[in-house]
Image (spheres, grey):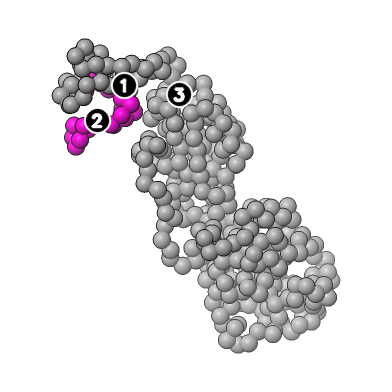
Amino acid sequence: MKAHTIRRETCSPESLSGLVLTRDLGKGEARFRKGQILSREDGPQLLGLPWDELHLLELEPGELHEEEAGRRLATAVAGDGVAVQGMTGGQWPLSAARKGLLVVNTEGVDRINDLEGCSLYTLYDRVVVTQGESVARAKITPFAIAGPLIEEAEATARSRGGVIRVVPFRAHSVGAIVKETLEPSARERFQAVLGEKIGWFGSTLLPVQYIAATSAAIGEAAMILRQSGATLLLMAGANAMDPLDPIFVALEQLGARMEKHGVPAHPGSLLWLARLGDVPILGVPTCGMFSQATVFDLILPEILAGLPVDRSRLTRLGVGGFLTRELAFRFPPYRNRAPRGEVEAGSE
């Protein structure tokens, strides 16, 4: 870009054509916005405004204006389930085209942001989003950028099928097994909370099995639920610190494989994950039986979206695993909540 200083006394309408304005000027219908490419018709109107000196930019061959470049960047990074909205305040918003789990290719985002002038910022990876919710914004920091940089950003995004996508939740049949130690009132509350959660994702909760605390009864209930079509099993009421708890004995007798016992997150650190064939079994910690915001509520959406959840995934929960009230935005909105707040879009 070439920078030009224009003085009113030496300016003609024709000399302004094709240049980029570097600051806002005027008000109302006569307002010109910074970053605007001036046309031949804008000259007389601009000369009618009060100013003594203007700083303008001239695009050089091979450079792209921020609007075209930003549109191309936003279009490239938007993967499946993500829609590009119109530019506002120099930024291109991207929104969720459906309810699902936001999946961010963090390496791709970092590579794009390493290109001078390119900016892409998103919500956290693997957060639940609803249709129409803003999930990211793309922008070009300067008023113009070299074309090859945008081409490189597009290639980075294209090689990954877009760097942000919204994965839809799959319909699951969910079976739940609970040791019979729960009182009737607690059973009703547990079923209501769990049914609300499972239903929000579009899945079905099979009749909850309240089973005697014997490994044989628990194992039999698990096999019955599998035969009933359960694609996910939840088990609650285990003494997670006791390796001889009937639930863990039943898992061993069934030939289930324990992926990870306990996770680096709180509340819900006693969550565990096992697999019986291709069916995941998620151990619901006591706090997760009634609460709306534990590590169980971070992992459940990932399983229901069909994302890989294994020992490695659970191990990585530590960073950000201190789930304070300020992190409530990370949890599914099982009940209506206000949209995630955004700072008013500007051009800074």
Q: Is residue 160 above or below residue 292?
A: above
> x, y (%) of residue 81?
50, 46
Q: Is residue 320 above or below residue 232?
A: above
Mark 2 closeness class: few <14, some 14–19, many ≥20 residues within 10 Å? some
Which of labels 3 and 2 is toward the front? 2
Q: Which structural element holds mark 3? A: strand
Amino acid on which the number 2 mark rests in the picture = Leu
Task: Work out how far the residue at label 1 is from the one at label 2, CA to CA, in angstroms.
Answer: 12 Å
Question: Quick check: 265 left or right of 192?
Answer: right
Q: Which structural element holds mark 2? A: loop
Mark 3 closeness class: few <14, some 14–19, many ≥20 residues within 10 Å? many
Query: What residue would you read off at disc 1?
Result: 55
Task: Work out how far the residue at label 1 is from the one at label 3, CA to CA, in angstroms.
Answer: 18 Å
Amino acid on which the number 1 mark rests in the picture = His
Query: What residue would you read off at disc 3?
Result: 145
Q: Earlier in the sequence, mark 3 or mark 2?
A: 2
Q: Is residue 68 visible?
A: no
Query: What residue would you read off at disc 2?
Result: 25
Residue 288 part of the magenta segment: no
Q: Which residues are magenta?
A: 21-42
